[in-house]
Image (spheres, rainbow, N blue to C red):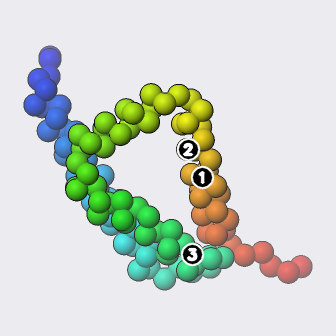
Amino acid sequence: MLENSSTRSTDSLQTFWVSLVCGFSKSCRRIFKKPSGSRAPKTLRVVAFIPLVAGIATPFVGIERAQTVIEWWTHQGSGVVRLTAVPLLALGGFIAYACAPARRAA
């Protein structure tokens, strides 16, 4: 069965709003929940503001503009895409380190 473009755009718009609400709620939970046992609780709260701000800004950017930016970014070549991954990997490594339980003295 063939889908028309309005069905696809409605489906992508619903997915867009669902992901927006999920990301927003996750960020709020990370900011307001008391972190227990993490190595850097204040820094983790600051880092949680990044997706919160992105979630608030997303409706103002719009899905068409976001798709245009993503298409432009992917057409820049593999070097730019890999270079963009470096800070994301560093952030992920920091979050893993900060959420790990502290080492105990032997």
Residue nearer the viewer, 58 or 75: 75
- Residue 38 is drawn in which quadrant? bottom right
Q: Is residue 3 left or right of residue 73?
A: left
Q: Residue at x 64, y 63 (%)?
A: 94
Q: Amino acid under label 3?
A: Thr
Residue 78 vs 103, above or below: the answer is above
- Residue 100 is drawn in which quadrant? bottom right
Q: Amino acid under label 2?
A: Thr
Numbered circle sitting on residue 84: 2
Residue 69 in the image, given as x and y percentages of width and height: 35, 39
Q: Quadrant of the C terminus?
A: bottom right
Q: Is residue 54 left or right of residue 45?
A: left
Name the residue tied to disc 1. Answer: 87
In the structure shown, which secondary structural element does the residue marked by tag 1 occupy? helix
Residue 2 vs 63, above or below: the answer is above
Q: Residue at x 33, y 66 (%)?
A: 25
Earlier in the chain: of badge 1 and badge 3, it is: 3
The reply to whether callout 1 and callout 3 are in contact (CB within 8 Å) is: no
Category of crowding for the residue at label 3, using alpha-carbon neighbours closer than 10 angstroms: few (below 14), some (14–19), many (at least 20): few
Q: Amino acid under label 1?
A: Pro
In the structure shown, which secondary structural element does the residue marked by tag 3 occupy? helix
